[in-house]
Image (cartoon, rainbow, N blue to C red):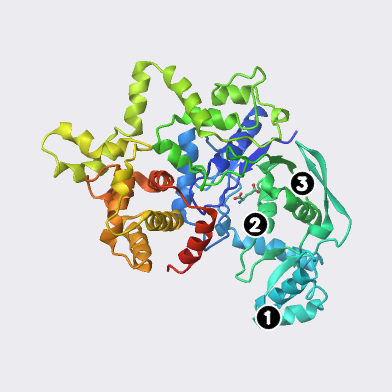
Amino acid sequence: MTTVRTRIAPSPTGDPHVGTAYIALFNLCFARQHGGQFILRIEDTDQLRSTRESEQQIYDALRWLGIEWDEGPDVGGPHGPYRQSERGEIYKKYSDELVDKGHAFACFCSAERLDQVRAEQMANKETPRYDGHCMHLEPAEAQRRIAAGESHVIRMKVPSEGVCQVNDMLRGTVEIGWDRMDMQVLMKADGLPTYFLANVVDDHLMGITHVLRGEEWLPSAPKLIKLYEYFGWEQPQLCYMPLLRNPDKSKLSKRKNPTSVTFYERMGFLPQAMLNYLGRMGWSMPDEREKFTLDEMIEHFDINRVSLGGPIFDLEKLSWLNGQWLRELSVDQFAAEVRKWAFNPEYMMQIAPHVQQRVETFSQITPLAGFFFSGALPLDPALFAHKKLDNTQVRQVMQLILWKLEALRQWEKERITACITQVAGQLGLKLRDVMPLMFAAITGQASSVSVLDAMEILGPDLTRFRLRNALELLGGASKKEVKEWEKLLATIA
Ligand code: GLU
């Protein structure tokens, strides 16, 4: 019998998402329950958006939660490398194989031509897709153009009609029409593979037997299935997990809910409680008990107990569960967990330089800098009353800064300052006009330590969370304002 092998394959392009942790947890449980292995693979073929910082954050977030992998970029293993950016030669070989077998072809179409085809299809109310222009080029002709250095991509052929049957472990057979499938690009002009090729090749070479992934990937399943068929490989079992949702049922998004695992760590949730809550997303213990450990989840795991209605990720529910966990700790454990959270030498060393010069006794530290140990702050609307700006302008500047900071990838004081300066400049304001607003939102006080340092220390999640709370307090942004301000945002370098 083959060993069950599952994997999580995150793209390191942003904050470590709770959705990634959720899918990782279910893959881990499935593998462990079958005595199998769980692998971590980094899908970093998007060179522009992938960063090593983000990759590290994924490791840290999963480990903080107690999710461990048997093979991965940082722990090694017999099927490495486990980082797709280090597997370029492998993808090239398999892409060539598909072209040789006539399942894929080189496409030389320019972006302009593709745009034009798309526009025409849209005008005719057709699904926009590649029109097959280069599919019938003679292979020798294509080879000649490639040898001459002409820019090209490799596309896969797909059937033009009929349906693809996707066998999903949760839904049974799902039929998806081939007329909805595009001739997917497998290799980009820069010689790097797209998700589709790299994912299939790696899952095969890494011996993955079961793929539990988010249901947002279900519509593209036929392309993956076709690729397995073209290669003549056995396809892993597929399982499309329901997506996490905001309490209003929309897809979990950071504009409505904090989605970064790091946020929950900074807020002082226990990792065991967080993992327990993720285990409750669409799944329940046979005896329906709410509180359980990872080991208990593994022991009783049954993929058929996953229900398809979109599980709601609700902060209040999570907080309640966390409270249950906290109360069951011994006092010793509780104190140890609190120390680990924020009363540890590392965090103290970040804060100390900023408070040392401003206090005469230690007892003044909490009134001055207690916000370093808080989550949401009790905010005073009076602190946001501005000499020059009316309420709309205040909300506008705060929203624009929030968006800029949401897009900021390297969380450093200079870069944070640059974001704020750019927004202020675009609105004809000075940095000192907007800093009091930042001060009020981040520290909840009229004076404290340097707010830019505080933002750096608090980290992206808590900073954005507090800015968002302040903005809400002042009335948020209407749909119309969001539209207008987004246009303005686009003009800020
Ligand atoms: N890299 C993809 C992601 O970031 C992996 C999806 C899959 O599991 O196939 O979600």
- Asked which quadrant contains residue 97, the reply is bottom right
Q: Is residue 271 left or right of residue 72?
A: left
Q: Is residue 471 above or below residue 483?
A: above
Q: Is mark 2 within 8 Å of ligand 1?
A: yes
Amino acid type of the residue that numbered disc 1 sits on in the rendered structure: Ala
Amino acid type of the residue that numbered disc 3 sits on in the rendered structure: Gln
Q: Is residue 101 visible?
A: yes
According to the image, label 3 marks what residue?
235
Residue 39 image position (x, y, % from top left)? 59, 41
Give the mark nearest the N terminus, 2 or 3: 2
According to the image, label 2 marks what residue?
195
Which residue occupies the foreground of this view, 25 or 102? 25
- The mark closer to the camera, 2 or 3, is 2
Give the mark nearest the N terminus, 1 or 2: 1
Count residues near mark 2 (Cα–Cα under 10 Å), then give few for <14, some for 14-19, many for 20+. Answer: some
Give the spatial CA distance, label 1 vs label 3: 34 Å
Q: Residue at x 46, y 66 (%)?
A: 488
Q: Residue at x 64, y 62 (%)?
A: 193
Callout 1–callout 2 Cβ contact below 8 Å: no
Element at badge 3?
loop
Give the mark nearest the N terminus, 1 or 3: 1
Give the spatial CA distance, label 1 vs label 2: 26 Å
Element at badge 2?
helix
Q: Is residue 52 left or right of residue 436?
A: right
Residue 452 image position (x, y, % from top left)? 29, 52
Q: Is residue 210 visible?
A: no
Give the spatial CA distance, label 2 vs label 3: 16 Å
Q: Residue at x 45, y 37 (%)?
A: 264
According to the image, label 1 marks what residue?
147
Element at badge 1?
helix
Quadrant (top left, top right, bottom left, bottom right) of the C terminus: bottom left
